[in-house]
Image (tube, rainbow, N blue to C red):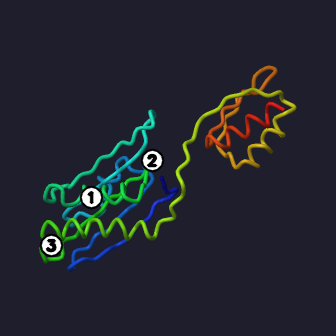
Amino acid sequence: MNTIEKSYRMTTEVNRSKFITHLVPISEYEGLQNKLKVEHPKANHVVYALRYLNEYDQTVENSSDDGEPKGCAGTPALNVLRGEKIINCAVLIVRYFGGIKLGTGGMARAYALAVKNVLKEALLIPYEKEIMYGFSTSYGDVDKTLYQLKQLDITYYEREFGMETVKWRIKGSEEKISIFSKSAER
């Protein structure tokens, strides 16, 4: 499975209709459809498709045709995300009608093409499940711990300074957390 770290935008034109495609990490999806409708008041539709993993590692999928004929917009966009094994992402497509009717098949192909085009531009990275890990250190080991985290490129950490120890919570891929925990045991 692959994912993205930042947003991408691409415009595809099919028979004078414009498809402005936004590929975003799932964390940026909430409220984006309404924002795009405000930014593009003359657009006919803002279609979306999304895929993400929930806390139980189940794939959650959703899509909307936003007034386009049923199954001609959101489903083809979702099928491209499925086919490319994209996870924890959403794609939103703003459509401006160009005056030429595409028909249901042509519309489905146009929406799929719009998603394929933005995926070509996106930097896809392998998805790694991240986990939280908690541990404690002495005050004397704080600098050593920070150095180890930096070496493993673990950038998310929280510290709570107690009377005699420092409590840590770090977040990283299962592989990096495993390497860190083994090195901390020594």
- Mark 2 crowdedness (10 Å alpha carbons): few <14, some 14-19, many ≥20: few
| Image coordinates for residue 114, horizontal then vertical, percent | 32, 68
Q: Earlier in the sequence, mark 1 or mark 2?
A: 2
Q: Earlier in the sequence, mark 3 or mark 1?
A: 1
- Mark 1 crowdedness (10 Å alpha carbons): few <14, some 14-19, many ≥20: some
Q: Quadrant of residue 100?
A: bottom left
Q: Would you name the residue on which mark 2 appears?
A: 27
Tell me the number on the disc at residue 37: 1
156 above or below 90?
Answer: above
Question: Is label 2 in contact with label 3 (beta carbons under 8 Å)?
Answer: no
| Image coordinates for residue 40, horizontal then vertical, percent | 27, 64
Please state, as top left, top right, bottom left or bottom right, where the C terminus lies in the image: top right
Q: CA distance from mark 3 to mark 1?
A: 22 Å
The residue at the point 56 percent across, 47 percent down is 128
Q: Earlier in the sequence, mark 2 or mark 3?
A: 2
The residue at the point 27 percent across, 58 percent down is 37
| Image coordinates for residue 7, horizontal then vertical, percent | 46, 60
Q: CA distance from mark 1 to mark 2?
A: 19 Å
| 48 on left or right of 102 | right
Could you tell me the amino acid type at mark 3?
Answer: Leu
Furthest residue in direction front, as rendered:
83
Q: Would you name the residue on which mark 3 appears?
A: 102
Could you tell me the amino acid type at mark 1?
Answer: Lys
| Image coordinates for residue 5, horizontal then vertical, percent | 52, 56
Q: Secondary structure at mark 3?
A: loop
Q: Which of pointers 3 and 1 indicates the residue nearer the eye? A: 3
Q: Which of pointers 2 and 3 indicates the residue nearer the eye? A: 3
Q: Secondary structure at mark 1?
A: helix
Could you tell me the amino acid type at mark 2?
Answer: Ser
Q: Which of pointers 1 and 2 indicates the residue nearer the eye? A: 2
